[in-house]
Image: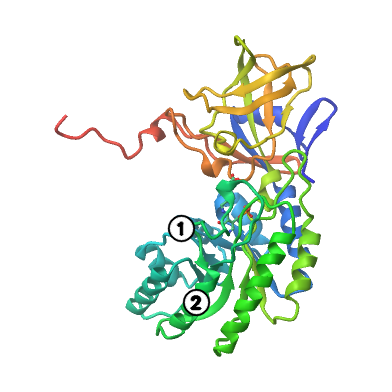
Amino acid sequence: MHHFQYKGDELFAEEVAIKDIVAEVGSPVYIYSRATLERHFKAMDDAFAGAPHTICYSVKANSNLAVLKTFVNLGGGVDIVSGGELYRALAVGVDPKKVVYSGVGKRDDEIAYALKTGILMFNVESEQELDRINEVAGRLNKKAGIAIRVNPDVDPETHPYITTGLKKAKFGINIERALGQYQRAESMNNLEILGIDCHIGSQLTKVSPFVDAIKKLKRLLEGVRDMGIDVKYLDLGGGLGIQYNDEAPPLPADYGSSIIEETKDLGLHLLFEPGRNLVGNAGILVGRCLYTKQGEEKNFVIVDAGMNDLARPALYGSFHGVRPVVRNQSGVIEGDIVGPICESGDFLVKDREIPNFQPGDLIAFMSAGAYGFTMSSNYNSRPRVAEVMVDGKRFEVVRERETLADLVKGESVPTFL
Ligand code: LLP
């Protein structure tokens, strides 16, 4: 459920007409609904009400400060994968003890930053990283909380680019080698073993892969406990899917009850790292039709938003629903909605039936709140677009549209030219 609905023929974000936002802020623009963000966070939090847990929102999905603050206000922690994400989360007052740090390539300076901040734990993704964290912690005279990110070799049955828990993936430590790494970690002076972690993939539309992964982790947990190591946290990552088109992912409540059932006797505090599920359907990208064009073989609607603004269709062939901001089109056509970028892969919609948009029409690309703005770039020297948050009848710009001057910020012509 989200709060982007028609009133009459006009698409609204909560109680604000989207055309009014564009009239003030321009297009393209990302628009987020606070009520939807809060609703999704609470649904996930409530799903685990029966177990000690913390929702550590995965910042990579949407790292705007307004979004982070929305979740922090509700008691959320964060899952980060860089020093930059930590900086953002701290800027909105996240409790450092609710921060988990994942990712295969943590640098020394990032490890040190996280240690000085006093984060809860590092999800360690390789044998060498374990040594590195121990060494940096020693230098700083700190103890680093760690979990080993285990690769359980479970197929999440999702897009190959967002499958992470298979043996062939670069992520985590193979479950068969994990016990040995717990043993090594136990012998290191500057580490405190706190948990076991896994994240098997993104946009999962079934509960069963999560349950399969937990079953494997439980066997590992037994071994770890047999070594006398007292683990407190079980981090189950993110990955619960959303409806983009006709998928029917489990509701958070169903995901929650299956996981609680599977973990209830373990005596562990559960951690979750949802990204997409909280923000995906809480955001849209709005663009304007510039031209229409009848190609030799098909119809094109050319808009002012491109793959640099929303990369998912180009990168994964992903589906985003399309809605006219004002429903005044007559009929439908079959074709593509494409951007201004000089690449054939620059499409937002491919080979679909779409309203017969005309130049000037505003188009909402739905379900763009996750991995939309965060994956956007300046390709083709296009300033990144504005972001707006709506709250009931009001809205505010939460990131200004970049200017032409922003495009060259930090660049210089060398003295020898
Ligand atoms: N935890 C870890 C360690 C992750 O790598 C990810 C996502 C998450 C949590 C959050 O997963 P979520 O709940 O959002 O599924 N750009 C792709 C998705 C990449 C996901 C990367 N990792 C897309 O646009 O579909």
Q: How crowded is mark 1: few (under 14 residues within 10 Å), some or many (20 or more)?
A: many
Q: Foreground: 279 or 226?
A: 226
Q: Name the residue under label 1.
A: 82
Q: Foreground: 7 or 82?
A: 82
Mark 2: which amino acid?
Answer: Gly
In contact (CB < 8 Å): disc 2 and disc 1 = no
The residue located at (54%, 34%) in the rendering is 309
Classify residue 98 by image quadrant. Answer: bottom right
Q: Position of residue 133 (x, y in %)?
A: 40, 72
Classify residue 215 by image quadrant. Answer: bottom right
Q: Position of residue 168 (x, y in %)?
A: 51, 57
Q: How crowded is mark 2: few (under 14 residues within 10 Å), some or many (20 or more)?
A: many
Q: What element carries label 1?
A: loop
Gap in Å between the C-alphas at discs 2 and 1? 17 Å
Q: Where is residue 250 in the image (x, y as percent from the top left)?
A: 78, 54
Q: Where is residue 226 in the image (x, y as percent from the top left)?
A: 59, 88
Q: How many labels does the image show?
A: 2
378 versus 352 height, above or below: below
The residue located at (44%, 59%) in the rendering is 83
Task: For the C terminus, give its image quadrant.
Answer: top left
Q: Is mark 2 on a helix, strand or loop?
A: strand
Q: Can the viewer see residue 54 in this picture?
A: no
The residue located at (43%, 27%) in the rendering is 380
Mark 1: which amino acid?
Answer: Ser
| Left or right of 183 on screen, residue 230 | right
In the image, which disc is placed on residue 145? 2
Q: Can the viewer see residue 189 in this picture?
A: yes
Classify residue 22 by image quadrant. Answer: top right
| Left or right of 44 on screen, residue 163 | left
The residue located at (64%, 71%) in the rendering is 216
Mark 2 vs ligand 1: CB below 8 Å: no
